[in-house]
Image (cartoon, rainbow, N blue to C red):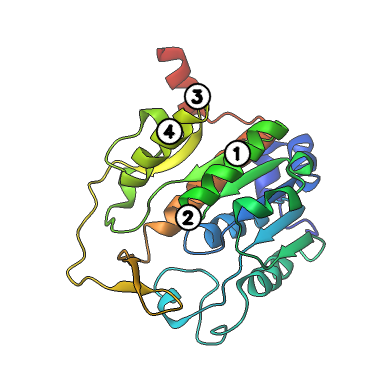
Amino acid sequence: MENNPFTRTERLFGKEAMERLASSCVAIFGLGGVGGNCCEALARSGVGHFVLVDDDAVSLSNINRQLIATFDTIGMNKVDVMEQRIHSITPQAIIEKRKTFYLPERGDEFPFESYDYCIDCIDTITAKIDIILHCQKAGTPVISSMGAGNRLDPSQLRIGDLYSTHMDPLAKIMRRELRKRGVSHLKVVYSEEKPTLPQQAILEETANDKPRRSIPGSTSFVPPVAGILLAAEVIKDLTGITPNSDKKEAEAK
């Protein structure tokens, strides 16, 4: 009887790569539709140490796309639900929870140099930029999710460099702001699909009831695929495993 839940993965990666994953520490910023699915894929691949960063609680509107959102988890902190889910898959995993909304002024509270990889799945531009700059300073690999809202075609999602993206309004802003700060390249997951305008505009409210921004529409199938792509790229980088498709592309160049 097998006692290793990752036997099938090890057949592809090999024992040494699996040991690297088990000893790797990955920080995931944002556990929503993208981050939650990314986190689970990492857990099911054998990553052994997680840093979960999210200030939010599960809400009713999360159910359409977020892995951890069910009627049973509404009102629970996302970091707590994700911790339970990871431990139901890999009970031995080390999990650090940071129930906080990441802001630039809190960046020094995070030991970026101790992370083997950082995954940015948040949508606040100033926070995304700060995470990327801290990772660059610490020499820590980082990958960032661009816009997954208002998209209907998961087959248009791509992995590439930020400065090669198109059709992504968030990526456009990030290119401009990171260029100002001297960042010459950044691995991202983005969509080549032109965003679809929501049929009904809904404004997100601030604490004083003033409109802050229009809430994007979302589906059950685009954000999760973005999360899976993020996880796949991180796994490849941590293990050094190169799929045959990547090898053919490199040979073609």
Residue position for label 2? 124
Which mark sits nearer the N-terminus, 2 or 3? 2
Which mark sits nearer the N-terminus, 4 or 1? 1
The local secondary structure at tag 4 comes to helix
On the picture, is 182 further left or further right than 235? left
- Closest to the camera, between mark 4 and mark 3, is 3
Within-10-Å neighbours for mark 3: few <14, some 14–19, many 20+: few
Q: Which one is in front, 6 or 51?
A: 51
User: Is residue 45 in view?
Assistant: no
Q: Which mark is residue 184?
A: 3
Rounded to the nearest angstrom, the CA distance separating label 2 from label 1 is 16 Å
Residue 219: horizontal and vertical position, in percent?
Answer: 33, 65
The local secondary structure at tag 1 comes to strand
Within-10-Å neighbours for mark 2: few <14, some 14–19, many 20+: few
Rounded to the nearest angstrom, the CA distance separating label 2 from label 4 is 17 Å
Which mark sits nearer the N-terminus, 3 or 1? 1
Residue position for label 1? 142
Q: Which mark is residue 162?
A: 4
Residue type at the position of mark 3: Ser
On the picture, is 37 further left or further right than 154? right
Residue type at the position of mark 4: Leu
Which residue sits at x=67%, y=41%?
117
Which mark sits nearer the N-terminus, 2 or 1? 2
The local secondary structure at tag 3 comes to loop
Q: Residue furthest left?
A: 199
Residue 34: horizontal and vertical position, in percent?
Answer: 48, 57
Which residue sits at x=58%, y=28%?
242
Q: Which one is in front, 121 or 224?
A: 121
Q: Which one is in front, 44 or 149?
A: 149
Residue 50: horizontal and vertical position, in percent?
Answer: 72, 55
